[in-house]
Amino acid sequence: MATRSVRAEEIERELESLLTRETFPPPEEFRRRALIRDDTPWREAQADPVAWWERQARALLDWSEPWQRALDDSNPPFYRWFVGGRLNACENALDRHVRAGRGDRVAFYWRGEEGEERQVTYAQLLHDAERLATVLRERGIGPGDVVGIYLPMIPEVVVAMLACSRIGAPHNVVFGGFSVEALRDRLHFSEAKALICVDGARRKGKTVAVKAAVDRILDELPSLGTVICVRHTGEGAPMRRGRDIWWHEALAGAGPTPPEPLDAEHPLFVLYTSGSTAKPKGVLHTTGGYLTGVAWTQRHVFDLHDDDVYWCTADVGWVTGHSYIVYGPLVCGATSVMYEGAPDYPDKDIWWEICERYGVTIFYTAPTAIRTCIKWGVEYPLRHDLSSLRLLGSVGEPINPKAWLWYWRVIGGGRCPIVDTWWQTETGHILISPLPGVTTLKPGSATRPLPGVDAAVVDDAGREVAPGEQGYLVLRRPWPGMLRTLYKDPDRFVETYFSRFGRETYFVGDAARLDEDGYFWVVGRVDDVVNVSGHRLSTAEVESAIVAHPKVAEAAVIGQADERTGQAICAFVTVEAGVEPDERLAEEIRQGVAERIGKLARPARIIWANELPKTRSGKIMRRLLRDIAEGRALGDVTTLRDPEVIAQLETKVRELQ
Ligand code: WTA
């Protein structure tokens, strides 16, 4: 123990001195083996971006039919890529590797919460996916029919997604941390015909009955005629005749279904994400372009070699899981780790134990996780041999330099480059990121746009701002993996992303700065989206869950800066006349939010307000609330209807501190 704390102290001293170091060129040893070692891809893509993407699509994917036109940009922002080409996502992820004699390769080292292990090969995934595809077909699911997926981190979730793509049924995966009411809304919006779920899920030694909970909402979804239930915890689940079937029973009796060659623009999945209104946005991705972008970035941003063991700690319910746990790694034929449990169960060193046990070489996580590990202390990673690691990645929110340096030194042993990857649900794949064999890193910056990507920082009028100045991040050229529309809502698609700066400039919703070297520094969201532990939540959605409480009159939700989670949800709430707000009401409100959205959206802080600050036209001034909550000097308040409101709130916030 004593030697360990000496080491910990040494590391802490070293971290102090690192704080002044600004640049980190690729280590020579890493560079020598890297797939990309110079700026050739940037130069080639610059010369002809569309032709460059075409070469990647050909090199990385198997097509059953070549495309006639690489990019149809005749009707922006409705771009189409690889027009006329045909392919199948599942075939690219599984069949072709098995055909090439690589069926015995491990696709996933799966690790259960209680330490159980499963090695799942490409051949096994294919065996199950081609049978589940048959089951879905027999239940009348065909191309274009949406299938909901509500599963924990078990190999079946991969099989479920790929079985859908095998028959051209877009999947709609809903994060297991969302409540069944949130699930109901997403299934309803996407008009899902089937749902794949689980009997029960495990979390830190406890089990939750999932199927029984799901049953509560199924009656409200008349178009959903099939439920396929995976037996996982052995809870036992209520099964309704004619509608519900057990996964293992159905698969046992099914033969294989071949992959359906689909149009490059065939919808691959819908994934709901938060926007500035309460209604989540159904981001739609299609097949050919999405897979091209995901495969290229998986291979080159992560410098993926045949002998790598790759681990992305995200959940498949988020886009990071879609692109960099399922499609990216499998299309590239990678060997990955998949872990069911929490990072602190049974103890806070479980991630590092897993890295050691499976010899993880590439590790991809979120800044919030790193900050939590910092809080827990270096003792936990120091318990394990992490020398197999050679590359680290970060995603989901800006990484503060202190967390970056800790990650680099403590986890990466000072030898692993960190790829800080900027992208969104909508972009489909990474767009701004270092290439680890080439790019000199600066802690806190996602560095530069990848080859073929045209990003800029502009002012209100759409003019590029000078280095050092903050502006809006925009993307000025279509890229293959971009969302094609919002599901069943093309007007909202145009309005949200392509109205502010015209139909050919994608409005990201992030604020950013460029530095003198052309490096991008993403600051955070400019819309009413809160980023809690890398999870995107809409303030409007949380507000509507809060005002659903009968004693609440009005609510305004903001993201408040938080050292560990990036942002935390802070709710200003006014109550109905005659109601005396107290801790019990606060608890009821939190519980209501957990039921309507999920535990992750519960407000960390509830501030009772007599009134909310509004403009004369009646809009809640959230910016002002953020300043109040974070104790900042208030800017211009002249547009405020009733300045008295502010003084009252400031007093309340001070009282709470
Ligand atoms: C933020 C997650 C800074 C950003 C893949 C973006 C980041 C939103 C980074 C998308 C990064 C993601 N640096 N900010 N490396 N990566 N973000 O849709 O605000 O869940 O708009 O996709 O996360 O979140 P989403």
Image (cartoon, helix red, strand yellow):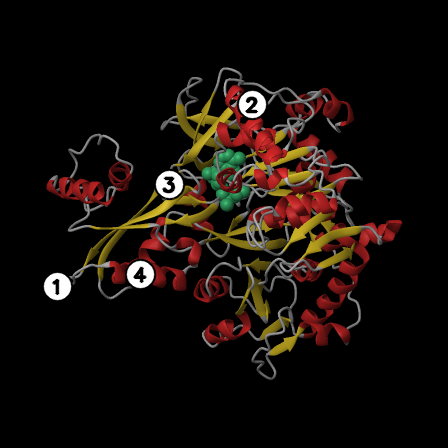
How far separated are the C-alphas under marks 3 and 4? 28 Å
Residue identifier under label 4: 587
- How far is disc 2 from disc 3 in space, using C-alphas? 38 Å
Residue 4: x percent and y percent? 61, 35
Q: Which badge, 2 or 4, comes first in the chain's sequence?
A: 2
Q: Earlier in the sequence, mark 2 or mark 1?
A: 2
Q: Which mark is residue 527?
A: 3
Q: Earlier in the sequence, mark 2 or mark 3?
A: 2
- Left or right of residue 529: residue 134: right
Q: CA distance from mark 2 to mark 1?
A: 58 Å
Q: Nearer the viewer, mark 1 or mark 3?
A: 1
Q: Which residue is mark 1?
A: 578
CA gap, disc 1 and disc 3: 34 Å
| Local secondary structure at mark 3 | loop
Mark 2 CB near ligand 1 (8 Å cut): no
Q: In the rendered view of the protein, which quadrant contains the C terminus?
A: top left
Earlier in the chain: of badge 1 and badge 3, it is: 3
Q: Earlier in the sequence, mark 4 or mark 1?
A: 1
